[in-house]
């Protein structure tokens, strides 16, 4: 990143807990045993699935907000 920040840094600190909750919820939905702390036993593919679905869900929520639909279904 050009602003000196790590790309995985939360830019809105108040959202940190919500993002963590989303991560564990999505991992559970995908059947991935994500636990707090070290997850070195997970494959890059498993971790990628969780991150990918998080992004997909956040994009869907943003699109709904832009369309004036609100809500957080997804």
Image (tube, rainbow, N blue to C red):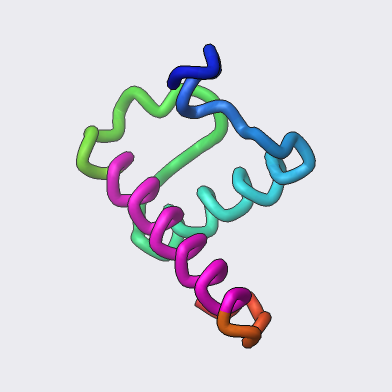
Q: Eyeballing the image, is 22 above or below 66?
A: above
Q: Is residue 40 above or below residue 14?
A: above
User: Residue furthest toward the bottom?
Assistant: 69
Q: Quadrant of residue 66?
A: bottom right
Depth order, front residue of 32/2? 2
Q: Does residue 55 sit above or below 64 in this rendering?
A: above
Name the foreground residue: 72 vs 21.
72
Q: Where does the image place residue 44, in percent across and percent down from the top left? A: 23, 34
Residue 57, image x, y percentages: 46, 65
Query: At 32% from the left edge and 40% from the top edge, which residue is drawn?
Result: 47
Q: Position of residue 5 (x, y in %)?
A: 54, 18
Q: Residue reaching furthest top?
A: 4
Q: What secondary structure prevails in the magenta region?
A: helix
> In the rendered image of this protein, does residue 47 appear above or below residue 26?
above
Query: Is residue 5 toward the left or the right of residue 44 in the image?
Result: right
Q: Is residue 62 magenta?
A: yes
Left or right? Give the position of 44 relative to 3: left
Question: Residue drawn at (65%, 34%), measured in percent from left and top?
Answer: 11
Quick one: 6 or 50, which is closer to the camera? 6
Q: Residue furthest front?
A: 2
Find residue 1 and report its horizontal and vertical position in percent: 44, 21
Residue drawn at point x = 29 percent, y = 34 percent: 42
Region of the chain picked out in magenta, as a range: 47-66
Check if residue 64 falls in the magenta segment. yes
Identified at 29% across, 43% down, the residue is 48
How many dots with numbers? 0
């Amino acid at each position: 990143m050009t602003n000196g920040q790590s790309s995985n840094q939360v830019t809105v600190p108040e959202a940190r807990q919500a993002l963590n909750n989303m991560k564990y919820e999505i991992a559970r939905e995908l059947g991935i045993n994500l636990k707090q702390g070290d997850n070195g036993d997970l494959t890059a593919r498993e971790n990628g699935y969780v991150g990918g679905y998080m992004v997909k869900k956040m994009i869907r929520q943003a699109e709904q907000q832009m369309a004036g639909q609100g809500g957080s279904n997804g």
